[in-house]
Amino acid sequence: MNQNRRLSTNTIVGTIEHGPRGPILRDDDGVRWRLGFADGQVPDGLAGRVNVRGRIVEIDRIDVDYLVGET
């Protein structure tokens, strides 16, 4: 069966943690998301509280469109 699925963009605020396969975003509810970047490169100095805008592509993974640190 071929179903059309619309991938919506979500914005999630959380804290960056470092995992064995790359950065992990932990939101305020304790949910953890693996972060995927289009070019495969993790930005330098990625740490602390951030806002992430992206598409949820798996139950535990977000493809990042935009990421900015909180001040």
Image (tube, helix red, strand yellow):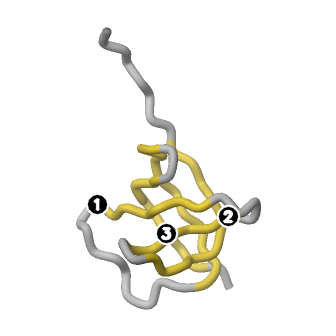
Whether residue 60 sits left or right of residue 50 in the image: it is left
- Structural distance between the alpha carbons of marks 2 and 3: 14 Å
- Could you tell which of marks 1 and 3 lies nearer the N-terminus? 1
- Structural distance between the alpha carbons of marks 1 and 2: 21 Å
- Could you tell which of marks 2 and 3 lies nearer the N-terminus? 2
Would you say the residues marked 1 and 3 are in contact, meaning their CB atoms lie under 8 Å apart? no
- On screen, residue 27 above or below 61: below
Q: Inspect the image, locate mark 3, and give the three-letter code of the amino acid beneath it.
A: Leu
Q: Horizontal and vertical percent for residue 16?
A: 56, 77
Label 3: element kind? strand
At 33% from the left and 64% from the top, the residue drawn is 37
Mark 1 Cα-neighbour bin, 10 Å: few <14, some 14–19, many ≥20 = few
Q: Nearer the viewer, mark 2 or mark 3?
A: 2
Q: Horizontal and vertical percent for residue 17?
A: 55, 78
Mark 2 Cα-neighbour bin, 10 Å: few <14, some 14–19, many ≥20 = some
> What label does residue 67 carry, if any?
3
Residue under label 2: 27
Would you say the residues marked 1 and 2 are in contact, meaning their CB atoms lie under 8 Å apart? no
Label 2: element kind? strand
Q: Inspect the image, locate mark 1, and give the three-letter code of the amino acid beneath it.
A: Ala
> What label does residue 38 carry, if any?
1
